[in-house]
Image: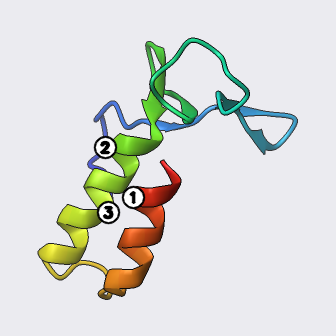
Amino acid sequence: MAKEGTNQANPLLKNGQWQIEDHTQGQDCSEALLFMMKDRDHEFALPLSVVLSCLRVAETEGYVPSLSDNWWIDVKNAY
């Protein structure tokens, strides 16, 4: 839970939908997917690679259940 007064980032919503940029159709970008986020002062993109890295840390530190090695291999091969 964020402390009151912190500048917490949240998904950028439009009409109740997360704003996601799909770059898998050959756009000039090294990231396949960008999650559009916002905090009190800024809008910014969070690349899928960062989300996956954070998930790996959370898994390693025991904050989320372990994912199978095959899942990680499939994700690595997909991107």
- Whether residue 67 is visible to the viewer of this picture, yes or no, is no
Q: Earlier in the sequence, mark 1 or mark 3?
A: 3
**Badge number at residue 4:** 2
24 with respect to 54 (left or right): right
Left or right: residue 4 compared with residue 35:
left
Q: Indicate the position of residue 26 as horizontal and vertical percent values.
A: 67, 22
Q: Residue at x 36, y 87 (%)?
A: 68
Tag 1 secondary structure: helix
Q: Do the residues labelled 1 and 2 touch (CB within 8 Å)?
A: no
Q: Which of marks 1 and 2 is nearer the N terminus?
A: 2
Residue 73 place in picture, x, y as percent = 38, 70
- Residue 33 falls in which quadrant of the image? top right
Find disc 3 in the rendering and name its residue: 55
Q: Residue at x 43, y 78 (%)?
A: 71
Which residue is labeled 1 in the image? Answer: 76
> In the visual, does 58 lie left or right of 23?
left
The residue mark sitting in front, 2 or 3, is 3
Picture coordinates of residue 53, whole percent (x, y) = 27, 52
Amino acid type, callout 3: Leu
**36 or 4, nearer to the observer:** 36
Residue nearer the viewer, 5 or 27 = 27
In the orientation shown, which residue stands out farthest toward the front? 77
Q: Residue 6 carries which label?
A: none
Q: From the top left corner, tell me how far across and down residue 52 is, in percent.
A: 36, 55
Q: How far apart are marks 1 and 3 (CA)?
A: 13 Å
Res 25 seen here: yes
Residue closest to the eye, 25 or 41: 25
Task: Describe the element under mark 3 as helix, strand or loop.
Answer: helix
Q: Type of residue at label 1?
A: Lys
Question: What is the C-alpha distance between the residues marked 1 and 2?
Answer: 37 Å
**CB-based contact (under 8 Å), mark 1 and mark 3:** no
